[in-house]
Image (cartoon, grey):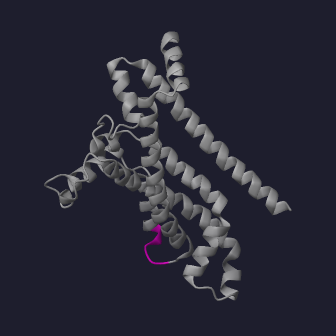
């Protein structure tokens, strides 16, 4: 174990090309999926938060239930749609980074929608009267709430990114874990561990932990900065 850890640190410090190719693809796929999920989930969460309609309770139950979507089921459904015999097979997206982004977006969009709904609903309770007095439209109210809650919503985006970057089941089904094409950190860790190459697996694990800590630190710093500005 000690030798494997030493080799892993050596790989990281030496800037191993294969290692950082895998890391780069992981970040590109996960960040892209997070952005798309936020573009979909934040407006949906905000609209549900400020709206009152028949069946809203059932809608909330569904949103919360979708947070626990099984990754392998999502991967299978995306595979069936993108396979050659599927309705979107003509696009030729299966076993590409694009297919992985689609699968991750489907997985984390419900997380973003459900968490942002709670944040926006709590904020809307404070501003509802003011919005009515200003005769704001629903779209204007949503835009104002999203802007005012932007720092809290960074945490929501972080939760989505954390789920995306740690995903294995869905991405390996639609991406195939192809070397130099669709191999990301999680699938590479699983493969290298099964092969007995613990050095590369540990190196990727170290990078994954550093990324997670770095993103958390950045978001925490932004939130602290926002609080200081609010007190000024």
- Would you say residue 209 is visible in this rendering? yes
Horizontal relation, residue 195 to residue 200: left or right: left
Quadrant where the C terminus lies?
bottom right
**Residue plotted at (64% across, 58% down):** 152
Quarter of the rendering containing residue 127 = bottom right
Residue 48: percent from left, percent from top: 51, 71
Above or below, 60 against 66 in this view is below
Residue 159: percent from left, percent from top: 54, 49
> In the rendered structure, does residue 90 fall within the stretch colored magenta?
no
Magenta region: 53-57
Q: Nearer the viewer, residue 113 or 222?
A: 222
Q: Looking at the magenta stretch, what is its main secondary structure?
A: loop
Residue 37: percent from left, percent from top: 45, 58
Residue 49: percent from left, percent from top: 55, 70
- Would you say residue 64 is visible in this rendering? no
* Count of numbered tags: 0
Above or below, 134 against 80 in this view is below
Horizontal relation, residue 229 to residue 18: left or right: right
Above or below, 175 against 7 in this view is below
């Amino acid at each position: 174990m000690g030798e494997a850890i030493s080799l892993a640190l050596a790989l990281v410090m030496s800037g191993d090309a294969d290692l950082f190719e895998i890391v780069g693809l992981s970040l590109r796929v996960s960040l892209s999926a997070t952005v798309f999920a936020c573009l979909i989930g934040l407006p949906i969460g905000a609209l549900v938060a400020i709206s009152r309609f028949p069946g809203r309770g059932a809608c909330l139950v569904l949103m919360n239930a979708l947070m626990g979507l099984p990754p392998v089921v999502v991967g299978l459904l995306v595979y069936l749609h993108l396979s050659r015999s599927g309705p979107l097979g003509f696009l030729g997206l299966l076993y590409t980074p694009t297919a992985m982004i689609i699968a991750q977006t489907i997985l984390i969009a419900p997380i973003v929608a459900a968490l942002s709904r709670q944040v926006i609903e709590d904020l809307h309770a404070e501003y509802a009267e003011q919005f009515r007095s200003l005769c704001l439209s629903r779209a204007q109210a949503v835009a104002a709430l999203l802007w005012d809650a932007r720092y809290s919503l960074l945490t929501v985006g972080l939760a989505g990114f954390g789920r995306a970057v740690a995903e294995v089941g869905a991405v390996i089904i639609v991406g195939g874990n192809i070397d130099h094409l669709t191999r990301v950190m999680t699938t590479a860790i699983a493969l290298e561990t099964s092969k007995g190459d613990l050095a590369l697996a540990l190196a990727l694990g170290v990078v994954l932990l550093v990324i997670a800590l770095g993103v958390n630190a950045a978001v925490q710093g932004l939130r602290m900065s926002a609080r200081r500005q609010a007190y000024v």
